[in-house]
Image (cartoon, grey):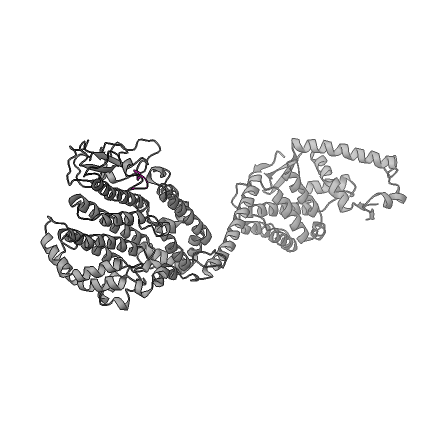
Amino acid sequence: MSQTQTIDTKTRTTSDRDAKSYIILSGLPPAMVEMMLTVVGKLRLRNGEKYDVACELVEHFHDGIDAGIAPDELMKLFGDTAQIATLIRRSKKRQRSIYWWSMVRTLQAFGCIILLFIICYIGAIFYYHSGSPVISHDYLADVTAKSRSVAEADRAWPLYREALIVLKPAYHELTVGNAIYAKKPGDEGWDETVDFLSTHAESLALVREGGSKPGLGFVVGYTTGAENSALWSMGENEESEPVSLVDGSLIGLLLPFLAEHRTLVKLLSCDVYYAIEQGDSERAAANINAMFGLAKHSRETPTLIGDLVAAAIAAVAFETLGEALQDHPEAFSDPHLHTLAHELSSLTHDRSDNILLVRLGCEEIYMLDVIQRIYTDDGDGNGHLSPDGFSALTAFTDGTVPPESPSSYIFFPAVAAAMADRKELVAEYSRLLDKMIADSMKPLWERATAEECVDAEIERLASDWRWRTKYHMIYLLMPALERASTKSELMVQERDAVMTAVTLELYRRDHNGNYPETLNALVPEYLPSIPADRFVGTDLGYAVSPDYQHITLYCVGADMDDDGGRRPANESKNRTKASQWERRHNNGDDHADDPDGDWILWESEATDEQENIG
Amino acid sequence: MTMKIERELMRGAGPVVVLKLLETGERYGYELVEALSKQSDGILAMGQSTLYPMLYNLEAKGYIKSEWQKQTNGRKRKYYTLTGKGKGRLASDTKQWLAITKAMRAMGVIGGDGSAELGSTSALIPGKVVPS
């Protein structure tokens, strides 16, 4: 072996052609060459392995011939080419390293996964492109059920409409900028307001009559209705028609009467003062009651915006009554005050028709209606996002309808699979909304902290892209209801204050013009119980001057601290920063930046100074 | 009389015989073919279809290793050498074959001189002895 030299074939670059060339150029007999080419051709090994085998076989036959064995005999001993190719292939493959096998198995597993994914994805393409939304529930019928059920004779809207047809063209006489403001004697423009009120007394009488009707009777839809064409021109209709998420969904509903109600309540407020000036307490009280009627009518179609408008109208009514009592305590007769106190109390008596309650649950049917228009329906309450629904959702987000393309067709299933199915979406939406509603039904002092409220939960959930993708519709369409959820409580606080003010006026008349030392004196003859401070849960704040001639009703305000009825510095109006309730924080460090002082709800004198208050 | 050993029997005997041949030093393929044929009087002769896959399997298991060497005439040969692991396997297999032989003798399958009791072969050996 000293005559030999070691060579390394592993590092040699070889190819299938090299193995065959090596055999062809071996100088062996053609039949032998042919046989070896057949074997190598059947090996199905890597090129280097084939080359190695070819070299060894060639040398084997050379050695055989050199040993004097006839080529035919050697070929006979060689055996069946197919069999030897199979055996060599198996044994050579066993020589491969564990790393090679690991790589092969990994690639095979990866390939299987890819194949499985492709099969599943093809299935997903068929699945997500199958089915289409089914409008199985007429939510519009639900929304309009109450309006439609109001008897013709009980409908306020025809009266409001008749009044508005006359009043609206004359609004410009009162408009400052684009708005009409509630005014009272002494305000700039009061004379013009009086002229307007006296000129349109008949129309305002119609509004008062409408306010006393049990229902509004305005059946909402996607147009303002032919019967209202004299009030709203077609041009206005077209301009005011909102962009809907999908054609025919509740999101596209028109509620044009709400804006009219907001204006009418201001006119009624002005007419309260005008009636008092005229000594017509009957009309003043009727105006107040008509305001409550407008608030109630604004809620007939269950919408969140309708409830908020109703609350705003009620706020104007409370403010007007409170200021009238303040400026003209003798304006209302005892029976009128009793009636007004009763009306104020009854606003929240009926839980199903509590006009101060902002019904967050109204939003649910709007969401369910959208869902039924963009999700398919499997008949069991479930379904997947439909391609058309996805386009509608994208159009709602981006403002443009995405063009259809092969790529969007292929990638849509990936998007649809990442998003929640119909049941999951409804369940998560209901969970969050129910939690929000449950919290909104509690008095402010029992509400969840800022960290525990639903808005904070949504914010936390949305910080995770998986949740944000899965429940994109909730993220997109669930409104921030924090302000709306506190509105009811603030309205109740204002109602309680003005109701207490009415009863205090009755008390004062019964007690030689003196107010009581405490509110306990009102119970039970004037009030069934002392209203609560909605911020902290204690009795409503009450401060009285030493001579019992002047009083202040107050809530502790945003700083949650009873300052004895002192208004925060540099604040003069009833609705101040002190009235802006904010949720507590878990760390308890809440009110450092809040104005130091109380939310003054009602004062017996129109003054910003509190020096007379004991 | 030259016999061919049945494939199943050869599958067991072949590797230990090859390892034994390599015990004395490195050998290339054809050299092994010749040695098997000559030293066993043709009984353990095996064709290329058996030898080379067997060598590749033994190499895959680490019992032998191979190396290409260039000859003075310009050609090259792949030489096989017994590894440490192969030596262990050879020792183990040798013990087993001795045990089998002893058992065969005790059973009277083979005589004291190693000759077979042909009259009872077909009843005791799964493979059959085929005249060459």
Q: Is residue A163 magenta?
A: no
Quadrant placement of the C terminus of chain A? top left
**For residue B35, above or below residue A127:** above
**Percent of width and height locating residue A260:** 23, 58
For the magenta stretch, what is the residue range?
Answer: A526-533
Name the residue at the bottom extreme.
A226
Residue A435 in sight: yes
**Percent of width and height locating residue A553:** 23, 38
Please name whichever residue, A582 or A424, is drawn nearer the observer in this view of the structure. Answer: A582
**For residue A388, above or below residue A183:** below
Q: Is residue A515 left or right of residue A220?
A: left
Q: Number of callouts in the render?
A: 0
Q: Is residue A527 magenta?
A: yes
**For residue A347, above or below residue A198:** above
**Percent of width and height locating residue A93:** 61, 45
**Percent of width and height locating residue A271:** 17, 54
Quadrant placement of the N terminus of chain A? top right
Please name whichever residue, B67 or A42, is drawn nearer the observer in this view of the structure. Answer: A42
Please name whichever residue, A392 or A409, is drawn nearer the observer in this view of the structure. Answer: A392
Q: Main secondary structure of the magenta part?
A: loop
Q: Is residue A460 left or right of residue A610?
A: right
Q: Is residue A524 left or right of residue A22?
A: left
Residue A406 in sight: no
Please name whichever residue, A184 or A106, is drawn nearer the observer in this view of the structure. Answer: A184
